[in-house]
């Protein structure tokens, strides 16, 4: 059974990457309005506006995690082909490490060449987030070296969550360990096809995440979607899908303690309950709407959706580097926040296009290498079987 790539989901991943860019742009150039920096009352900041979903990076990251849980487990759950799972496990670390390593080394090169201007830009915008290299460190200067950059990009950002060269990389540790959890859950669910058994497996995983690491819970939600959405597709009424999208976007815009538009939610939502759960539910609603609405799926599956999806991960990786270099330089030279954001966006898209080309080449090489590894292992097993058979 051949699993076709779902362009509509790629499109939404690209939109989520733009949301993260918007979040960082607000933190860099409008710190008081961000609702996280400065002394402004939360009620007077973006966090209390109904449109905050458009710049709420936390909600976008949770969407990434739910989507990873869904797309990494869905093919195996649909087919039960063990080779899909084995290839996924083998490829996951190098698949992520290739473009991450390139990005981190590029950041080192920017440090080395003196191309970062976030400190003088922060002096103008009064953003502590900007002053600390987009939140990458708390103020203690570090000494960039090529060796430390290579080690961080290839290994430490995944194993320890290091992100001193690119603050966006704080998610890579979650992505790596979350992916391994997804593969393990998919393996268990294929061997527990009964509805009650699957519920038990997913509930146990959700409880573990709740106790140990709530930020991993969205991955479990993604696997649950992959396990229970109809195998042959389904259709949702257009009105219902539209309502689900609107509600999900409003949920993505909520942050703990928000006032104004969200004052009622703040009063009702248990403060002890992690916000990740709200965002994970919203992400699930968006994915279900995209899968079930013919109109929404058709709109998201156009050429722009394909391009958006291909650029999404590279764009996510490089945009902080461009905000802190060309964007900051533009702001210092012109004093225009709009020009700085426009320069950051345009250059990030250009850099993402280049990184996407590398990423495509890297994935092709990985696929060839993994295929050779698995076919070699199969040949060795056959050879051992023949040797045993002949000797007996």
Image (tube, rainbow, N blue to C red):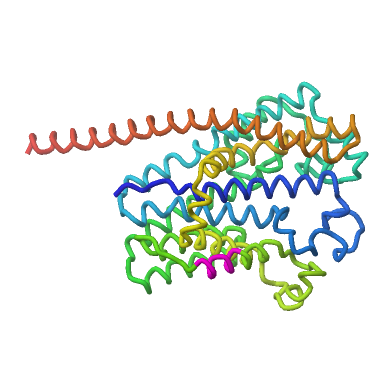
Q: Identify the residue shown where x is 92% and y is 58%.
A: 39
Where is residue 194 drawn, in percent x and y? 33, 70
Q: Which residue is most to the bottom?
A: 268
The secondary structure making up most of the magenta span is helix
Where is residue 185 drawn, in percent x and y? 43, 59
Q: Is residue 388 left or right of residue 246?
A: left
Where is residue 294 drawn, in percent x and y? 46, 59
Compare residues 367 and 210 and report the one nearer the observer.
367
Q: Is residue 302 left or right of residue 4?
A: right
Q: Identify the residue shown where x is 55% and y is 64%.
A: 285
Where is residue 55 drawn, in percent x and y? 73, 53
- Give the quadrant of residue 28: top right
Q: Is residue 82 magenta?
A: no
- Give the quadrant of residue 367: top left
Q: Which residue is most to the top?
A: 113
Indicate the quadrant containing the C terminus: top left, top right, bottom left or bottom right: top left
Compare residues 138 and 299 and report the one nearer the observer.
299
Q: Is residue 175 left or right of residue 234?
A: right
Q: Is residue 345 left or right of residue 240?
A: right
Q: Identify the residue shown where x is 75% and y is 46%.
A: 24
Q: How many marks?
A: 0
Q: Identify the residue shown where x is 42% and y is 44%.
A: 88
The vertical placement of 308 against 56, above or below, is above
> Where are the magenta residues, as a range?
238-245
Q: Is residue 242 magenta?
A: yes
Compare residues 221 and 351 and report the one nearer the observer.
351
């Amino acid at each position: 059974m051949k699993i076709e790539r779902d362009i509509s989901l790629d499109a939404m991943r690209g939109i989520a990457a733009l949301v993260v860019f918007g979040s960082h742009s607000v933190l860099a150039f409008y710190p008081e309005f961000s609702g996280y920096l400065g002394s402004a009352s939360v009620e007077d900041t973006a966090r209390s506006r109904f449109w905050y979903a458009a710049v709420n990076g936390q909600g976008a990251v949770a969407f990434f995690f739910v989507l990873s849980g869904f797309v990494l487990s869905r093919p195996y759950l649909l087919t039960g082909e063990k080779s899909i799972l084995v290839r996924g496990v083998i490829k996951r670390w190098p698949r992520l490490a290739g473009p991450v390593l390139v990005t981190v080394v590029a950041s080192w090169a920017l440090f080395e060449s003196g191309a970062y201007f976030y400190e003088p830009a922060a002096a103008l915008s009064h953003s502590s987030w900007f002053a600390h290299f987009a939140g990458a460190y708390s103020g203690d200067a570090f000494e960039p070296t090529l060796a430390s950059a290579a080690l961080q990009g290839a290994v430490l950002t995944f194993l320890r969550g290091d992100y001193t060269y690119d603050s966006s990389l704080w998610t890579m540790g979650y992505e790596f360990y979350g992916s391994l959890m997804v593969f393990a859950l998919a393996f268990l669910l294929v061997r527990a096809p009964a509805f009650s058994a699957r519920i038990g497996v997913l509930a146990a995983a959700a409880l573990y995440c709740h106790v140990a690491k709530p930020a991993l819970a969205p991955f479990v939600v993604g696997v649950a979607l992959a396990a229970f959405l109809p195998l042959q597709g389904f259709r949702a009424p257009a009105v219902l899908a539209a309502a689900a999208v609107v509600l999900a976007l409003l949920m993505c815009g909520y942050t703990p303690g928000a006032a104004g538009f969200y004052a009622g939610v703040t009063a009702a939502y248990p403060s002890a309950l992690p916000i990740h759960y709200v965002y994970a539910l919203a992400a699930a609603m968006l994915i279900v709407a995209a899968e079930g609405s013919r109109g929404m799926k058709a709109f998201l599956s156009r050429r722009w959706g394909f391009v958006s999806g291909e650029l999404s991960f590279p764009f996510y990786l490089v945009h902080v580097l461009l905000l802190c270099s060309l964007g900051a330089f533009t702001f210092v030279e012109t004093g225009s926040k709009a020009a700085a954001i426009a320069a950051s966006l345009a250059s990030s898209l250009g850099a993402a296009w280049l990184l996407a080309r590398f990423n495509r080449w890297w994935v092709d090489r990985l696929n060839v290498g993994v295929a050779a590894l698995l076919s070699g292992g199969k040949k060795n097993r056959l050879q051992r079987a023949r040797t045993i058979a002949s000797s007996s």
